[in-house]
Image (cartoon, grey):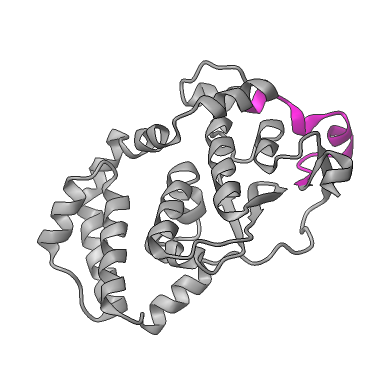
Amino acid sequence: MVGRTGRWPIIYWVSRSWEDLVSGEPFDRRDFEAADRGSRIVGDTSVAGLIARAEALDLEEALRGEEAQFWKREFLEGDLETALVETEERWGKRPAESELRRAAEAALDHELEIERFLLKWEVAQGEPPEAVNLAIANAIPDPLGPPLEPSALLFLPTTRPWEVYAYVEGLWNHPSDRLIKAAKGWHERFGAECVLVSPFTQLRVDRPPSDISTAWEVAREHFELARDTLVLPGTRVRDYARALMKARYWELKSKP
């Protein structure tokens, strides 16, 4: 119906009351302004302004900025030890600590590099053991079902699914130009379309990544743009990357 209505439909969680909904609460620009302030961004947070910002944004530069945050270096030793112990529990063996350490120390985001290194190592081992297959299965979001909370069907004045995030905030306290830019790329590459915005956002995916290298790049984007997607359920990035090759829905989370 989008071609006839000229509007993109999404399910939207009613966070307060129906009165707030019909008075325009979902479209309050204060949430967008607060997200920019939290990231020390001074920019136009109108719908047109966010779309223009997204068009001009270098997403790779923004992702590398996320990876380079200094506080991440504080947990290197603990993350290395945990990763090696968990890998041995899952596979009955593990890579050499010196190789993993060398890769992690050279990376901007050592946590992400540990996961990338271990994914490459695990793929080389062949068929995953049962514990790994279970972790991959658990990382695949369920298809969209009936809303558990009061929800509304919004018809937004755009035919471009990535522009949904200029009208309503898809990730709490994250600058929306990044999500708009990423969602446009996901739509072009994978046919990803926003279908729901609530405390998280869900996208339906027509063409999941067909190879592990592509899936890893998407997992990296999800991890850096919406870290709670993986942190809250305790999902390893390497398991999530494998899951993306099977998932027909993506669920990005940002905890209020």
Is residue 256 visible to us here? no
Q: Where residue 210 sits: x, y (%)?
A: 48, 65
Q: Answer with the quarter of the image where residue 3 lies.
A: top right
**The magenta stretch spans which residues?**
12-32
Q: Which residue is more in the foreground, 131 or 256?
A: 131
Q: Residue at x 10, y 60 (%)?
A: 98
Image vertical order of residue 52 relative to residue 17, above or below: above
Q: Answer with the quarter of the image where residue 155 lies.
A: top right
| Quadrant placement of the C terminus | top right
Q: Is residue 174 left or right of residue 16?
A: left
Is residue 183 visible to us here? yes
Q: Answer with the quarter of the image where residue 128 lies.
A: bottom left
Q: Residue at x 45, y 35 (%)?
A: 59
Q: Residue at x 26, y 74 (%)?
A: 124
Image vertical order of residue 241 relative to residue 178, above or below: below
Image vertical order of residue 89 relative to residue 103, above or below: below
Q: Is residue 158 left or right of residue 107?
A: right
Q: Where residue 196 sits: x, y (%)?
A: 71, 50
Q: Where residue 67 sits: x, y (%)?
A: 34, 40
Q: Where residue 53 sits: x, y (%)?
A: 56, 24
